[in-house]
Image: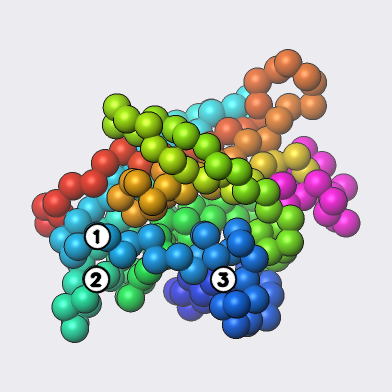
């Protein structure tokens, strides 16, 4: 729990392997992903629903869902966030985050991704956290895009990183060195996160990806329980 909560401060960057810094020192990508208050326009007793699809040639894919319920804090302000992240044997037990501002679904997605990298490569989670932190802080690319959402086009920003292309330990997980992360943010959608996707290309050009995952916002709805 402590690890995930400090990850929530990568705005603070601690659990991703870096020293704490003042907010003014964050890169534009860090500011957009972890410092911006994505939940500012939302009210308690709202649930954000996401779909998650995994495909690729490495192993069997699946379709699943995730949701994040927002409730009032003891002082009545928004929001405490509690997630139901995937289901059945894939379910990821995650702690609630009090006083959430940046959308915790980004942290939850990254936590699952790091555990998957550990499973697939036998590498150490803290190493993957460090590589992701460095890539977001120092090597992210940001571009403006217009994308469809619920029958309309919305302005969005894509933040892309490839944490392992220049990894000094790349020989340990050569299959995954081209792994790309794309975070798509939009002020026009509930919770500010339109989608997060990762892709590992196959070695042979023109063949399906080795692994592809995408989590996308489905809808916002009143909390029912």
Q: Are marks 3 and 2 in contact (CB under 8 Å)?
A: no
Q: Secondary structure at mark 3?
A: loop
> Compared with residue 83, is residue 217 higher up or lower down, i.e. above or below?
above
Residue 194, image quadrant: top left
| Residue 149 place in picture, x, y as percent | 35, 33
Q: Quadrant of the C terminus?
A: bottom left
Q: Which mark is residue 42?
A: 1
> Is 81 situated left or right of 36 in this image?
left
> Is 3 situated left or right of 20 in this image?
left
Foreground residue among 186 and 48: 186
| Residue 137 place in picture, x, y as percent | 68, 64
Q: Could you tell me which residue is drawn at 52 percent across and 59 percent down?
A: 33
Distance (Cα) linking label 3 and label 1? 22 Å
Would you say residue 165 sits in the magenta stretch? yes
Q: Are marks 3 and 1 in contact (CB under 8 Å)?
A: no
Q: Which residue is mark 2?
A: 78
């Amino acid at each position: 729990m402590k690890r995930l909560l400090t990850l929530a401060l990568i705005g603070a960057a601690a659990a991703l392997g870096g020293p704490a810094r003042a907010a003014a020192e964050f890169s534009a990508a860090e500011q957009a992903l972890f410092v911006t208050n994505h939940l500012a326009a939302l009210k308690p007793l709202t649930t954000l629903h996401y779909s998650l699809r995994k495909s690729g040639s490495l192993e069997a894919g699946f379709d699943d869902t995730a949701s994040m319920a927002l409730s009032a804090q003891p002082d009545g302000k928004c929001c405490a966030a509690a997630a139901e992240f995937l289901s059945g044997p894939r379910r990821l037990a995650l702690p609630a985050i009090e006083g959430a501002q940046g959308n915790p679904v980004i942290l939850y997605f990254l936590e699952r991704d790091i555990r998957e990298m550990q499973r697939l490569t036998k590498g150490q989670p803290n190493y993957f956290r460090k590589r992701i932190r460095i890539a977001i802080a120092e090597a992210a690319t940001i571009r403006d895009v217009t994308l469809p959402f619920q029958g309309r086009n919305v302005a969005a920003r894509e933040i892309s990183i490839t944490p392992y292309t220049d990894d000094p330990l790349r020989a340990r997980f050569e299959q995954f060195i081209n792994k790309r992360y794309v975070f798509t943010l939009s002020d026009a959608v509930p919770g500010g996160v339109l989608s997060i996707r990762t892709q590992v290309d196959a070695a042979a050009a023109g063949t399906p990806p080795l692994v592809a995952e995408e989590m996308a916002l489905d809808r916002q709805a009143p909390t029912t329980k």
